């Protein structure tokens, strides 16, 4: 079964550094893996809407108010970045906010109604939106490596190899080489995702992929 150590050792092997058995061991490569792994994983999760990390969550209101938005929601668990926000019952149309609606194209009003922003309020990050009873589709921080798909593992391995090459080998060309491999692998992942997706014209009212899946 795949583990964090397996991924780290795969990256270490690419830059000709001996493997580790534990992130806590007293070696330079273990320290490098321990430092870079979580940062690189989260950074890569934010680069692309990986299918295994796409998550839906009903948002909870914080009880706070904002002068320019109807609702203030708490961030959902392990939030990395948002994809879409929509009413959980899919029967409520949110307001388009402070937009003068005369002679404004309908599609613009639809997009405005489903806007949201992240902000810091009262010491925490929140989601500001005009969508009532909101549900969010978002990328979740995934720590269980057994959920990673093979393309993600390969791409993460190249990123780790690039990040660790300089501190462990001092070879900038090696770091640049694996950064190029990382960019290529990420582009390949995006192409695969595009080929798997079936796109349709945006409806007059936004429908989430969660709702479409239930139909």
Image (cartoon, helix red, strand yellow):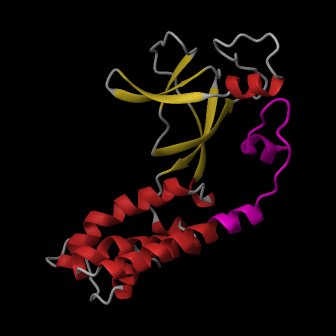
Image x and y of residue 35, in percent: 26, 64
Q: Quadrant of residue 12?
A: bottom left
Q: Residue at x 27, y 89 (%)?
A: 18
Residue at the image position 76 percent from the left and 64 percent from the top: 196
Pick the quarter of the image with the C terminus.
top right
x 24%, y 82%: residue: 169
Image x and y of residue 39, in percent = 35, 58
Using residue 13 as the reference point, say whether residue 68 is left or right of it.
Answer: right
Asked if the stretch drawn in magenta spans residue 80, the answer is no
- 152 vs 145, nearest the viewer: 152
Residue at coordinates 69% horizontally, 30% vertically from top-left? 88
Up-down relation of residue 151 to residue 128 (above or below): below
In magenta stretch: residue 207: yes
- The x and y percentages for residue 120 are 38, 27
Left or right, residue 154 beside residue 143: right
**x then y, percent, for residue 181:** 49, 77
Q: Is residue 7 visible?
A: no
> In the image, is 18 to the left or to the right of 81?
left
Q: Residue furthest left?
A: 26
In terms of depth relative to the viewer, which is nearer, 105 or 39? 105
Q: Looking at the image, is 10 positioned above or below residue 192?
A: below
Q: Quadrant of residue 68?
A: top right
Number of marks drawn: 0
The quadrant in which residue 176 appears is bottom left
Q: What stretch of residues is rendered in magenta?
A: 190-215
Q: Is residue 27 visible?
A: yes
């Amino acid at each position: 079964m795949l583990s964090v150590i397996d991924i780290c050792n795969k990256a270490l092997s690419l830059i000709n550094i001996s493997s580790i058995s534990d992130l806590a061991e007293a070696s330079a490569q273990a320290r490098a893996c321990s430092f870079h792994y979580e940062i690189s994983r989260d950074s890569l999760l934010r680069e692309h809407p990986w299918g295994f990390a796409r998550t839906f969550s009903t948002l909870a209101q914080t009880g706070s108010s904002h002068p320019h938005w109807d609702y203030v929601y708490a961030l959902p668990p392990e939030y990395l970045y948002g994809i879409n926000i929509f009413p959980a019952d899919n029967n409520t149309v949110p307001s388009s906010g402070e937009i003068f609606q005369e002679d404004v194209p309908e599609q613009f009003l639809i997009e405005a109604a489903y806007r949201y922003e992240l902000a810091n309020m009262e010491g925490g990050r929140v989601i500001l939106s005009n969508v009532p009873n909101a549900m969010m589709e978002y990328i979740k921080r995934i720590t269980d490596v057994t959920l990673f798909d093979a393309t993600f593992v390969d791409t993460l391995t190249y990123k780790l190899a690039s990040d660790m090459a300089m501190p462990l080998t001092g070879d900038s060309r090696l770091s640049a080489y694996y950064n190029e491999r990382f960019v290529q692998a990420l582009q390949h992942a995006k192409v695969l995702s595009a080929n798997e997706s079936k796109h349709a014209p945006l409806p007059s009212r936004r429908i989430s992929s969660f709702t479409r899946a239930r139909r």
